[in-house]
């Protein structure tokens, strides 16, 4: 196999180009380096335990919830909600003081205080959202892959155990089929491949791997948002089968190309069955795809960037070639898809208590 990955033509909806988002996701590490808890029994495989997330929360709320997740996971959700209410109350108090000071000599001071408080709350909320995502993974008994430098040994990247069944278990049948087709399209390994085939090695550049990981996060976010929209329209009996038909959709680009190539508007194929998620998504035009794929909040967008930077670190700038198996690559991107799905859930859960900044 030449270069990094082989591609298969995708038959389902792709994501919009990166230009559709408010700002591109950066892949270079610009923040304080993070440490992780990881252990390795083998120099050639990445085996990890404990809270092995690549991003370590640094805010008071993040550190507090880290302890709760480790020591008292049963009360994690209640504690996280209490922290969000505390932050919302503190921000409201500062905003009220700013309003009262308008027109006075202290208005400038209170405006600056409000800006600092806003930044402080935003950082804490991002850490809370991240811990909520880690809580979701811990419920599946799956540990996030730690910083990539801890898993690459002499240019070889392998993950063990794969936890593939657990990572797939959160998706419905229809969503899982689309996830598997996404993985097949971007890594070139068939879903029905045998064990021997999945452990065949391939080569991929580190920067390419980083982009595929971030794209898979966005794809997981998109599927979660779109599948819920599909479910609600079915419940409300809102027909979507009368969209104007533009004929068969043209060849779709793999999701990994969203960073460099604009996606075309996808037409509706024939008289669609409202029960079928795949045909429902094929009826999306560009605007609808962007609506479902773009993170709704600045906090969610920042979290994708922070997590990616912490995972790949400064090494991504070297763009060296990594050798890995299809099985490890599949597990790595499955994690990214689940991360995007959990990000959507945590964003909506947080927005019920704390008003996020609109993206």
Image (cartoon, rainbow, N blue to C red):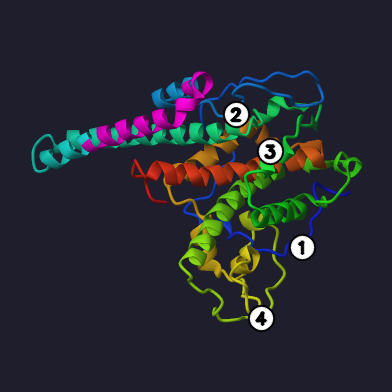
Cα–Cα gap, marks 4 and 2: 45 Å
**Residue topped by disc 2:** 54
Marks 1 and 3 in Cβ contact (< 8 Å) = no
Query: Percent position (x, y) of residue 84?
Result: 35, 34
Q: Is residue 293 magenta?
A: no
Marks 3 and 2 in Cβ contact (< 8 Å) = no
Query: Percent position (x, y) of residue 103?
Result: 9, 43
Residue 42's tag is none
Secondary structure of the residue carrying numbered label 4: loop
Which residue is found at the position 34% from the left and 41% from the top?
Answer: 354
- Please tell me whether residue 262 is drawn above or below residue 198 in the rendered image: below
* Label 1 packing within 10 angstroms: few (<14), some (14-19), many (20+): some
Q: Is 102 situated left or right of 163 in this image?
A: left
Segment tinted magenta in the rendering: 68-92
First in residue order: circle 2 vs circle 1: 1
Query: Percent position (x, y) of residue 199?
Result: 87, 39
Viewer-closest of 246 and 264 = 246
**Residue topped by disc 3:** 166
Residue 247's tag is 4
Secondary structure of the residue carrying numbered label 3: helix
**Residue topped by disc 1:** 9
Q: Is 246 situated left or right of 126 in this image?
A: right
Which residue is found at the position 64% from the left and 34% from the top?
Answer: 312
First in residue order: circle 4 vs circle 3: 3
* Label 2 packing within 10 angstroms: few (<14), some (14-19), many (20+): many
Marks 4 and 3 in Cβ contact (< 8 Å) = no
Which residue is found at the position 56% from the left and 24% from the top?
Answer: 34
């Amino acid at each position: 196999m030449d270069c990094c990955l082989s591609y298969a033509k995708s038959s389902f909806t792709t994501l919009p180009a990166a230009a559709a988002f408010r700002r591109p996701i950066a892949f270079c590490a610009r923040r304080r380096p993070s440490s992780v808890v990881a252990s390795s029994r083998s120099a050639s495989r990445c085996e990890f335990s404990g809270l092995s997330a690549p991003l370590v929360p640094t805010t008071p709320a993040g550190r507090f919830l880290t302890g709760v997740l480790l020591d008292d996971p049963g009360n994690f959700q209640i504690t996280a909600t209490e922290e969000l209410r505390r932050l919302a109350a503190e921000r409201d108090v500062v905003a009220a003081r700013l309003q009262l000071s308008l027109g006075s000599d202290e208005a400038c001071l209170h405006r600056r205080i409000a800006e600092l408080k806003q930044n402080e709350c935003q950082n804490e909320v991002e850490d809370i959202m991240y811990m909520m995502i880690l809580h979701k993974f811990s419920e599946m008994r799956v540990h996030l892959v730690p910083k990539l430098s801890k898993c690459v040994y002499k240019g070889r990247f392998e993950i063990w155990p794969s936890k593939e069944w657990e990572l797939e278990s959160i998706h419905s049948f229809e969503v899982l089929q689309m996830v598997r087709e996404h993985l097949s399209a971007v890594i070139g390994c068939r879903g029905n491949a045998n064990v021997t085939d999945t452990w065949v090695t391939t080569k991929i550049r580190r920067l390419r791997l980083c982009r595929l990981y971030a794209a898979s996060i966005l794809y997981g976010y998109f599927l979660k948002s779109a599948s819920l929209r599909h479910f609600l329209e079915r419940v409300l009996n809102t027909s979507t089968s009368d969209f104007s038909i533009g004929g068969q959709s043209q060849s779709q680009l793999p999701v990994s190309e969203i960073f460099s190539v604009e996606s075309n508007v996808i037409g509706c194929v024939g008289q669609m069955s409202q029960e079928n998620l795949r045909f429902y998504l094929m009826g999306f035009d560009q605007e609808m795809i962007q609506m479902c794929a773009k993170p709704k909040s600045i906090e969610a967008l920042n979290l994708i960037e922070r997590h990616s930077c912490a995972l790949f670190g400064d090494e991504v700038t070297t763009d060296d070639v990594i050798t890995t198996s299809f099985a490890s690559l599949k597990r790595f991107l499955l994690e990214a898809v689940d991360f995007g799905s959990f990000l959507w859930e945590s964003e909506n859960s947080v927005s019920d208590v704390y008003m996020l900044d609109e993206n």
